[in-house]
Image: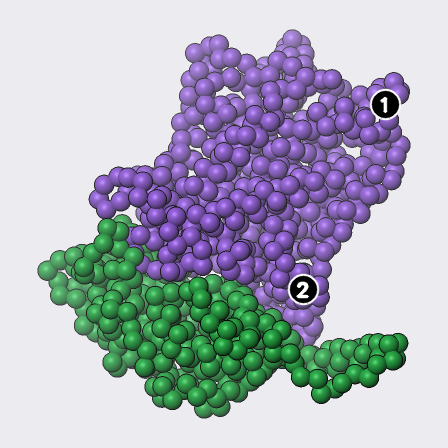
Chain colours: A purple, B green
Amino acid sequence: MTQPASVGAAGGTRYPTVAAVLVTVTFFGLLVVWPLASVFQRSLADVGPDRLVDILGRGSVRKALFFTVWQSFASAALTLAIGLPIAHAIARYQFWGRKLIRVVAVVPFVLPTVVVGAAIEAAFSRVGLSLGRSVLAILAAHVFFNVAIVIRVVGGFWAGLDQSPVAAARVLGASPFAAFRWVTLPRLMPSIVGAGVLVFLFSFTSFGVILILGRGGRATLETEIYRNAIFRQEFDVAAVLALVQLLVVAVLSLFAARFQRRHATAQRGRDRRGALPLRTAGQRLHVFGIILLVVGVIGIPVLALVDASLQVGGGYGFGNYRNLLDKVSLLPVSPARSMFTSLWFALIAALIAAVVGLLAAFAVVRAGRVGSWLETLALIPLGVSAVTLGFGYLLAFTVFDLRRSPWLIPLAHAVVGVPFVLASVVPALRGIDDRFRQAAAALGAPPGRVLLLIDWPLIRRAAFTGAGFAFAVSLGEFGATTFLSRGEESFTAPLAIFRLLSQPGDLLRGQALALSVLIGLMVAGIAAILERGRGEEVGLL
Amino acid sequence: MQLSLPATARRRPAATVRAIGLGLAMALITAACTGTVIDADAEVDVEAVTLTLITHESFVVSDGVFELFTEQTGIKVDVLAAGDAGEVVSRAVLSSGDPEGDVLFGIDNTFLQRGLDANLFLPHYSAGLESVPDELKLDPQNRVTPMGVSDVCVNYWIDALGPTPPPTSLEDLASPAFAGAFVTQNPESSSPGFAFLLATVSHFGEDGWEDYWRQLVANDVAVTAGWTDAYYGEFVAGGGSRPLVTSYASSPPAEVIFADPPVDEPPTGVLLESCFRQIEFAGILKGTAYPNEAGQLIDFMLGETFQQDVPLNMFVYPANETVSLPIEFTKFGPLSADPITMSPAQIEAGRLDWTQRWTDIVLG
């Protein structure tokens, strides 16, 4: 039943693969490796072995490394534990609100931590839990922000999974659990690991959540890099920590890439039945429980935010939204304009990420060993801190004066978007049974046509999922943007929200809340459009 | 504690020499090829000069202000506003000698010594300094020019105090009357948080400040990472329960200016005895190709048009004392007449040690 992943197959054309590899390497080389190399070259030049031992031997460094790794693992595990049942329900059952869940799940992705952190703390204190500096608040926030990755990446893959082997197993006497454990789960694993790695990396480099919910009492590698680079200006310490970060990311992603390669399963076909209508009371109860879970994890904080944005002077109204058209003195442009700047950047970033990501996905799947390295390379930007990369751009891009280009922000956003396209597309691509391609080729289809008729319909929905995430990542991005923005024409909505919340006054706070809700709506809107573009389950051929 | 100077500061000269060498070689080749003689004394064409002003993201000027400068001098200004004040200084130090721009605006007295030690600035004397109070001029060599002043002070929410009279001293914050009432910020991640720590060190002295913080901790002080989560999270303003917060002298004016619906009086007041003076400076970055033009920009920014524009855009007070203030500032937000201060050199010498000890006491 299982086929080895197709490597270097498909029409025997090597040039397109080589070209795809070159594009990927150039993109990441220019936008990630070069800036990082510049930072390390400058900050580590005078770090001898003694200094290195001194830095790595510090208690604070070891403590930060330990906490970073374990909270990232815990965040990823918790997010998977909560996200997988939701992914399963929306992949397998037809019920009202199924698409709504897929759409709403991405909203937290773009919400600023300063705005949502308070909502999460308030939600906890309402049920009598004072979080103080507890790790629980940090983990809860990471679940809230990242659960969409599991729901969409795994859910999308699950929905397209051929169900006939499960049916066969059941006929042969396997219990539903045994069928899941031995038939479904192994085939899901590549996408679960892919999503888990993404959640891990996002928690690994999480900054606002750690500072705001950890109250400065919890240090991670990311916050330590910032503290050393900005407050203490011990650049060599920051750079050594950044190297440690890089090392952890490289090891983890190499492991993940090998795992995915080994466990990739080609599918005979796709599920033509799609999701099933709810039949039994048990199924209805099950789905109802899932809906409650979604409301609890995503719905309540989001609704609290919407509620707050509608409060004006003791009553309710749209005053805060109307005010967005006015430029307050604190901002270089009106909040409304910052929203359009963000929209524009996010569309460009998503487009770049989709094109580069698709090429990279083909390179990863077809280029054998080189492919695993490319996958690792693509994950690195998720695992290095915005400060490191920001300083890198500053040092490296003086050469072509790219630093001043308005394209730099969407490009930097796209760098973070590509891994999402890869995480969605690569498992789908590996899941295509090569015999379909061979059959098409045997029937006389040239390689381009095979790609268009066999590969594209089978990876289309995955590509849309990835592009949607790239859009969301760009829309909500703050850390790198604050480094790269240069005022009016690149003043994005997250920057505006942050700036509005830097002075007292209900007018400013109201605008910040309304703006947060609107970028949430914007990403939900794009997700809804992509949802339609995905079409229903695409039948085979 | 070892303060590592950026490698750049030491390695730059060689690179610069190489760059100049390369530039000369290219110039010679060009000259040889075209057969023209390069006029070494060619004047920099003033019409074409565009200065880059490096500053923090809080920097905003009204439309037309820099346009006026361009009209007067022919020099254009390109504002590169990114990152907070600390990031701006770090970036400048990291790229010292090969700066991102020509003028830096927004290094404050808590970071000043670091910028001076890293040799970031060229001296420049502005005639406008005549109108600046002497206590703002912290560098006798005029490598930096004062641009704005603000006070970091404890604010209180008047209605939330109830019958309790507002605190009148730093000591009051540790008294039982204000148990669980005060929220401040982590000095390592927040500029007002750092200023408040400096206020306590200066007021209670090297021997007393740690005890004071132990008392604050016993009095259930809350600490947040930044200003926003303190003011809009724990403080009454955003729905929190604590009536005392570390903020600015200009916060009550902001409460009036950005009120919605409009109000006549701010809901907050300031504990003037807690105010720590922050002074923001601008300086010409060493390595600029246009030191003269950069000096003109400094002069302009110390002049009336720009200084008048500062309060409502950046919520700091102008350094030029001849400039008139908006009514909300004079009425609701006077600067402390006798603020707590500390010299930049003292701040730099104590910074890492104090914050480390603070962390052990408050978060340990």
Image coordinates of residue A10 in percent, x first then y, are 84, 29
Pointer 1 residue? A445
Considering only order in the chain, which callout, 1 or 2, is on the residue closer to the N terminus?
2
Q: Is residue A501 above or below residue A153?
A: below
Q: Specify the quadrant that holds the C terminus of chain B.
A: bottom left
x then y, percent, for residue A348: 61, 44
How far is disc 2 from disc 1 in space, using C-alphas? Answer: 46 Å
**Same subunit: marks 2 and 1:** yes
Is residue A204 shown above or below B275?
A: above
Q: Nearer the viewer, residue A314 or A331?
A: A331
Farthest residue to the bottom: give it.
B140
Which residue is nearer to you in this view: A505 or B338?
A: A505
* Residue for badge 2: A401
The chain to which mark 2 is attached is A
SS for callout 2: loop
**Nearest the eye: A55 or B60:** B60
Mark seen at residue B125? none
Residue at the image point whose x is 47% and y is 18% from the top: A95
Percent x, y of residue B21: 79, 81
Inspect the image, locate mark 1, and give the three-letter code of the amino acid beneath it: Ala
- Would you place residue A325 above or below residue A148 in this image? below
- Circle 1 SS class: loop
Q: Residue at x 24, y 69 (%)?
A: B327
Q: Amino acid at mark 2?
A: Asp
Q: Residues within 10 Å of mark 2 (few under 14, many from 20)?
A: few
Neighbor class of circle 1 (other Cα within 10 Å; few <14, some 14-19, many 20+) is some
